[in-house]
Image (tube, rainbow, N blue to C red):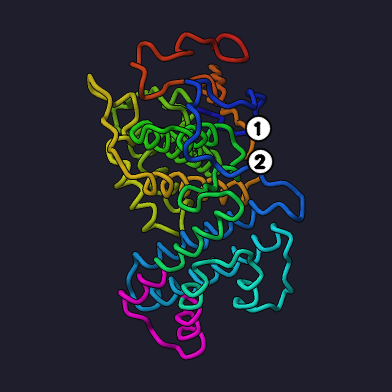
Amino acid sequence: MSEDHSVVRGGMADDDGPAGPSPTPSARPAAPEPSSSPFNVEPRLLLVRRLFTDSAVALECGDPPSLMQAVVLADLAVETASKAVSEALGRPVSRNANLKEVLARFEPPLASAPTAGQVRSQRNAVVHEGIQPDRATAEETVAAAREVLAEVFARVEHDFATFSAVGLVKNPLIREPLDRAVADTDAREAITFVAIAYRRLDGLIQEVLGAASGTDLWPFWQPLWSDTVTTSDLADGRHKEIRRTLRVGAAAVMGPDLLGLARLREMLGSLLTPPEKWSDTKPEAPELPPDEIAWAADFVALVAYSFERRNPGFRKPLVATRREHRMKRLVSAHFVKQYPEWPADEQPGADAEAPNGDVDG
């Protein structure tokens, strides 16, 4: 039994993230890094993207309060985007300007302006009259908002359907595969990289929960965020119980959008099987439409961003320490480098030494 429990702390790993194949030319570019400029529109568009994503999630819930929420959030996304883009184009509006006044500032006029008016009418019915929209009305309103947002984003040369929150994520362990996901033109490869990012994020949160709760993680030879984790099988099966408990805890930390998390896991399917449990062949990635891949990458990015905001120390690479009696094992976040397209016995970095020298024992 270990006397000292697992420790997670900031590391000195490379800022470039885990090694891997070079990204292909981007067909779905991630959002540029936010800057401090008051005229930088990207952070506000990321907020819009999140508002609309929350609207879509509420629509999927389908209960009356959620349908009302879907309409209100869709309208808020339209108004926020319109004001941000108008300002970015050099036509700022007053803080108290209504949506009609904002839309009137666009030159040439937005073809979807009447559609935006319809979205606002449905929002007013919910907010001011307390009308509960039926599912069909809510779906039409969200679809109308998507149409308006597509035209508004295009005015600043962004594609709303593929605009990503990936640019908000700082930890290279998560950021690197997400960058590859939004850059890859092959749908199967793109969703595979989303799965890698999710598995790493899930493992990172599990590792942190283990350290924070004093759980002894010595049966797991590498940090739980690694792409491959060697596990010591204990006769009493305690290693399985520890991992199950940590997975449940990680799912709770990733909340509150548990329905979105369930949707993501269903979408990724067998890709969530860790490499050490693969059979002779790697899991086959599903071929999904671009908007589904963009949603999945955005969902993982927003969960990671939310986690980093609550825990700023996790924006950098981490180091986990394992102690068992007098044996110390130090493994960096970048020690294990395995990608699904490489067989386990050919993974780059498989023969690398631990960054602080050989492992004692």
Residue denoted by label 1:
10
> Would you call the spot at circle 1 few (<14 residues within 10 Å), some (14-19), or many (20 or more)?
few
Q: Name the quadrant containing residue 78.
A: bottom right
Residue denoted by label 2:
313
Instruction: Using the image as rendered, state which of residue 299 and residue 256 is in the foreground.
Output: 299
Q: Residue 217, relative to residue 311: is it above or below?
A: above
The disc at residue 43 is none
Q: Is residue 103 visible?
A: yes
Extreme-left residue of the structure: 280
Residue name at image x 64 percent, y 60 percent: 85
Q: Inspect the image, locate mark 2, and give the three-letter code of the amino acid beneath it.
A: Gly
Instruction: Tell me the CA gap for discs 1 and 2.
Output: 7 Å
Instruction: Using the image as rendered, state which of residue 160 and residue 224 is in the foreground.
Output: 160
Q: Are marks 1 and 2 in contact (CB under 8 Å)?
A: yes
Is residue 135 in the magenta section?
yes
Q: Which residues are magenta?
A: 119-142
Q: Position of residue 35 (x, y in %)?
A: 72, 46
Q: Name the quadrant containing residue 69.
A: bottom left
